[in-house]
Amino acid sequence: MRESRVLSFAHAMVAVGLAAGAVVTVGDPSASAQAGVTTLVVCAPGYPGSTAEAQSAMDAFATAIAAAAGWMPGELRAVYFEAEKPGVDRLAAPDAAVVLAPLPFWLKHRSSLRLSPQFQAIEEGGEAAEVWTLVAPAGGVSGPASLAGFEIVTTAGYAPRFVRGSALGAWGDLPADVRIVSSNNVLSAMRRASQGHKVAALLDRASAAAMPTLPFAAKLQTVTKSAPLPVAVLSAVGDRLRPAKLQALLKALRSLDSTPSGRQALAGVRLARFVPADQAALAKARDQFDRAKEWTEEMSPLRVMKVPKMVRRKVAMIRSMFQIFSIPFRSWIIEEWM
């Protein structure tokens, strides 16, 4: 059996960096600030790769944006983080003026980081919004109360109030003892659910669409779905950019897909274009997030369970973010075969 995981947005950046054979380092944030450099931080918790591996692709992306904005070469930098804490730490530096991140990240950190949503990123072949789907053992869940004692496994588990509020709040309040687990191994979670364990999986659009191809799909049920929610949000960080400079940057991002060089830069990070943020949709997601009850969540990794081989069966599960996202700012593929 061979298993591979590919997250389109993050993996594209990693692939470009490795293909270039570059060993890069990220500039010192204080030095960047002193030199008048603006930094775009891309943070996609749970995605593969590292900051160094992705830097080549980030450099190309920043160069294209700066050129479109009429900025001097090197005036804009971009850096990628695959984990939440390093991304948040980097955003504390004064040069970090713009951030592209998935909706759960934006909701969780919007107040502390003073994130002002400007655009949404659209992945190649994707849309600005996606529906999240809750999958559980067939016949085992009839309403929120049925999830007592369950664990919900999801890539968005680092923001439990997103799960309880923005994604599932309209369905009803989850029991206090529901444990929300942050993991990208939702395939293993669904297998455990199909075996009758008290496990549910909260899936993004692409994973939910691929779920029926699983050999044990008949033992799973779709319990509920969220309203369409933004995928990846590009925000200004506080007032670190002067209004005129911010507008120049936003204009450049908005028009990036209108030129061959811009489209090439977007394709390098598996994005199609940027569109104005849907402020109404973000406000609704924010209100649901804020109303979610504050339960103490144990954020522990999903215990790994070996998925058995399947004879003459190939299963592909495609996860969107930044596919972020699908930061897409939403993707990952799991393949199994003999």
Image (tube, helix red, strand yellow):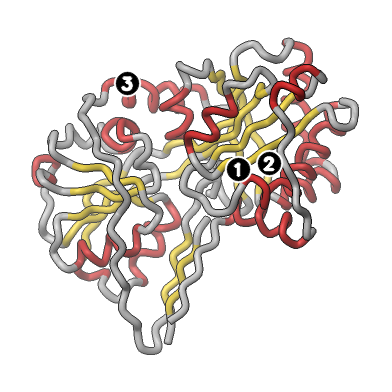
Look at the image and tell me in which quarter the C terminus lies: bottom left
Give percent across and percent down for residue 317: 44, 65
Q: CA distance from mark 3 to mark 1?
A: 26 Å
- Seen in the picture, residue 285 relative to 168 is either above or below; the reply is above
Q: CA distance from mark 2 to mark 3?
A: 29 Å
Q: Quadrant of residue 198?
A: bottom left
Which residue is at a point 25% across and 32% down the rendered structure image?
Answer: 169
CB under 8 Å between discs 1 and 2: yes
Number of callouts? 3
CB under 8 Å between discs 3 and 1: no
Q: Which residue is mark 1?
A: 122
Q: Which residue is mark 2?
A: 273
Q: Earlier in the sequence, mark 1 or mark 2?
A: 1
Give percent across and percent down for residue 32: 76, 24
Q: Which residue is mark 3?
A: 290
Which three-letter amino acid code belongs to the residue tagged 1?
Answer: Ile
Give percent across and percent down for residue 13: 67, 52
